[in-house]
Image (tube, rainbow, N blue to C red):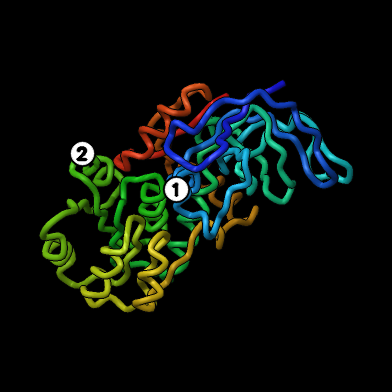
Amino acid sequence: MARAVRFDRYGGRDVLYIAEVGIPEPPPGEVVVAVRAAGLNPGEAAIREGAMAASFPATFPSGEGSDLAGVIHAIGIGVNEFAVGDEVLGWSERRSSQAEYCVVPVSQLVRKPPQLTWEVAGALYVVGCTAFVAVRAIDVSPGDTVAVSAAAGGVGTVVVQLLRTKGAAVIGIASEPNHAWLSAHGVTPVAYGEGLAERLTAAAPQGIDAFIDLFGPAYVQLAVDLGIAKDRVETIISFEKAYELGTKAQGSGDGSTPEILSAMAELVASGDIEIPIAAVYPLERVHEAYAELEQRHTHGKIVLVP
């Protein structure tokens, strides 16, 4: 038997529990991963609450989690890409990674670079692939000035670093306790809140070329109000506002390929990008992990370890 996070109905963190389940058998073309680390993401909390039921309905009992890293435990018929004992990272589309064992198609896994810790590898998929497509969406060039909202969050910390690798000047919108980290990574920090438009203008007197929103619709509106071209305004979260204003809206689904994940893993392994780990919780403390996540002030990623 093995442990897995489950919920049987929509609701707050109290609906989560640890279930004892059988260790799964892999179907053809899939493998069983013994999970060593699984990152948490805000979208998983929203799915559990039922806030995304129209687009991502749950089938109960439901598991939790997409990010994962671990060791191949068993392989299904026809699997030639991996062998038992291989170290991998990837994602589950079945909301099942927050568990001791997870069944995953081989098309959703890549080899883990040895330089990555389990916690970093298990936190990479959503933030890495989302950051990749967000930066790709604005077609950044060396010398561009790009503003990023929620710049010190899980996705934000990757976005700002990826922009810097491409030669962009980056303005990071974040709370003041996160300004030192942003400055240390070559980002100009700007506090959010009243007067933000004026602070952005002061930080970029020559103008802002592109804007990446990682927080909410007010930032998409702000970007348009600042006169930034709509085809260079990207949001990963405010899809209705993007449709209303005609801006871009891409998310991790647009970058969910092993090629993109592998490329991001190599950038982290080389040291070009850092994945800050805010906290690590054992599986049985899943309620505490989500409580910290849902404060929405975490710098970096929160990870569960079985």
Instruction: Give the image quarter of residue 37.
Output: top right
Instruction: Note whether 207 is above or below 61 in the view shown.
Output: below
Q: Earlier in the sequence, mark 1 or mark 2?
A: 1
Measured as percent of width and height from the top left, residue 175 is found at 21, 45
SS class, disc 2: helix
Measured as percent of width and height from the top left, residue 167 is found at 37, 61
Residue at which label 2 appears: 177
Q: Is residue 148 left or right of residue 41?
A: left
Q: How many discs appear?
A: 2
Q: Which of the two residues, 1 or 48, is positioned nearer the viewer here? A: 48
Q: Is residue 146 left or right of residue 64?
A: left
Q: Residue at x 45, y 43 (%)?
A: 45
Q: Quadrant of the C terminus?
A: top right
SS class, disc 1: helix
| Residue 272 visible, this orientation | no
Instruction: Note whether 116 is above or below 132 in the view shown.
Output: above
Q: What's the distance in space between the residues labelled 1 and 2, CA to CA?
A: 26 Å
Q: Is residue 87 left or right of residue 10?
A: right
Q: Residue at x 36, y 50 (%)?
A: 156
Amino acid, disc 1: Ala
Can you tell which of label 1 and label 2 is closer to the viewer? 1
Q: Residue at x 57, y 37 (%)?
A: 8
Residue at which label 1 appears: 46
| Residue 277 visible, this orientation | yes
